[in-house]
Amino acid sequence: QVQLVESGGGLVQAGGSLRLSCAASGRTFSTNNMAWFRQAPGKEREIVGVITWAGGNTWYADSAKGRFTISRDNAKNTVYLQLTALKPEDTAVYYCAADQETLRVGIVTKLSEYSYWGQGTQVTISS
């Protein structure tokens, strides 16, 4: 059974930091781009950032640039999202997802391009 399991969420004060992890099991995702999305209450799920399958390139939404960093350890089949300088508006459930295509050239940001999803981890930022 293929699973993506996020962890590391929690309640922190504005300005704080968190490190989210996404551990994959059931198959390797070393040849899939991986992405982080988030969904705030009453809002649509939005992309936060993407890391290419070899880890050499990343892309971030404007809201994440300069504050969030995606990394991956293919040996551990794990992707990370480092969150810093957190704001109350970052409050959301954060999901990791795997690109449906392997060895993709380039980066896609549409939700429909991602076929494997974790259950999400809640991040709450207090003001």
Image (tube, rainbow, N blue to C red):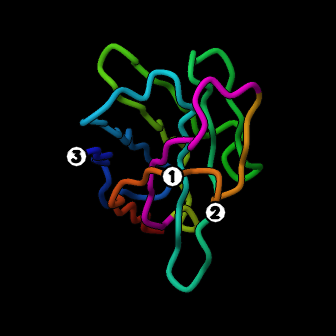
Q: Spatial distance from mark 2 to mark 3, Cα to Cα? A: 26 Å
Q: Residue at x 43, y 65 (%)?
A: 93
Q: Which residue corresponds to mark 3?
A: 1
- Decide: is 118 above or below 82: below
- First in sequence: mark 1 or mark 2? 2
Q: Which residues are magenta?
A: 91-105
Q: Which residue corresponds to mark 1?
A: 115
Q: Amino acid at mark 3?
A: Gln
Q: Residue at x 52, y 73 (%)?
A: 40
- First in sequence: mark 1 or mark 3? 3
Q: Amino acid at mark 1?
A: Ser
**In-image side of 73 versus 46 (left or right):** left
Q: Foreground: 77 or 105?
A: 105
Q: Amino acid at mark 2?
A: Glu
| Percent x, y of residue 12 | 36, 57
Q: Which residue corresponds to mark 2?
A: 46
